[in-house]
Image (tube, rainbow, N blue to C red):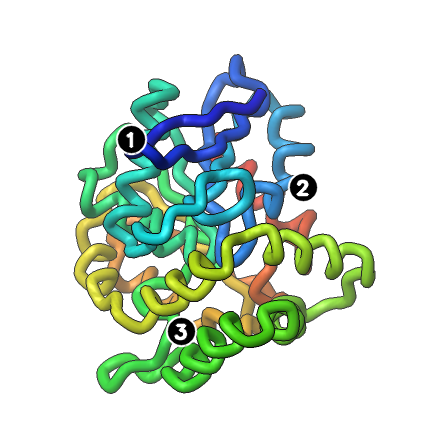
Amino acid sequence: MGYYINVEPDVYIYVEDINPRGRKTILFLHGWPGNLNLFEYQYNQLPKYGYRCVGLDMRGFGRSARPWRGYDYNRLSDDVRAVVEALGLKNFVLGGHSTGGAIAVRYMARHQAFGVSKLALFAAAAPSLIERSYFPYGLSRQEVLDIIQNTYTDRPDMLRGFGNMIFHNYVTPALSDWIFDMGLQAASWATAAIANTWLEEEGLFRDLKTIRVPTLILHGLNDLVCLYPLATAQKESIPDAKLIPFESCGHFLFYDQQKKFNKELLCFLE
């Protein structure tokens, strides 16, 4: 079941609600530059076990509105809050992948974990996707600047380059093309703006320390986008966190290790 939910007077967010009568809800936040369909292989499985899956397209991505502004973590987490209130979600699990994980962390801090009973972070871009003087992990600042520049000059080529970084194990060309097409569905200005947010945002270091709900951290040891030390930093900052490393696994762990990913997520949902 699909919805369009207004989060600002001229901005709407597209939401899919799968198995709305499920016994427990998980709200998925996708990573850059995809959309809610990235979690297709979770939507196919979790409802079989009685769970309700809610996915949303971030503003500028998928079928949501494509405004010129509003791509900082504060505004994006406010969009999530608007969806939570519109659907009346309570006692739900919040799950976020990559940039979606960073937005989930900001939501927990900025909105005091409103409605959230558990948090799940999948290769989350927190506390920082880029390396900093006090956090020497992640992409270099220049790599992100190149992504932004290439978004404005040859976005398809930039997306192909990013696609070459996200898997550790073999996936079919068809699946790779499918993810590439998701990236093309986004607004180019939104794609660049999110990358710029990676450069500017440093508040997640503080935000992680505010989380007080049971938290599952799933992270590939071979992740080339959000390096594994990000996961250990999350574990060290969140008091009630469980970190499960995925061997032979890259950034898109729900494809690289699909069965293991679904198994660990199901165990956490119980």
- Work out whether mark 1 precedes mark 3 in sequence or the reverse, and give the earlier one: 1
Q: Which residue in the structure is indicated by mark 1?
A: 9
Residue type at the position of mark 1: Pro
- Quarter of the image for the N terminus: give it: top right
Residue at 60 percent of width and 47 percent of height: 38
Residue type at the position of mark 3: Pro
Residue type at the position of mark 2: Tyr
Q: Which residue in the structure is indicated by mark 2?
A: 41
Residue at 36 percent of width and 52 percent of height: 68
Q: Secondary structure at mark 1?
A: loop
Q: Which residue in the structure is indicated by mark 3?
A: 229
Structural distance between the alpha carbons of marks 2 and 3: 27 Å
Residue 175 lies, with reference to residue 51, above or below; the image says below
Structural distance between the alpha carbons of marks 1 and 2: 33 Å
Q: Secondary structure at mark 3?
A: helix
Circle 1 or circle 2, nearest the eye: 1
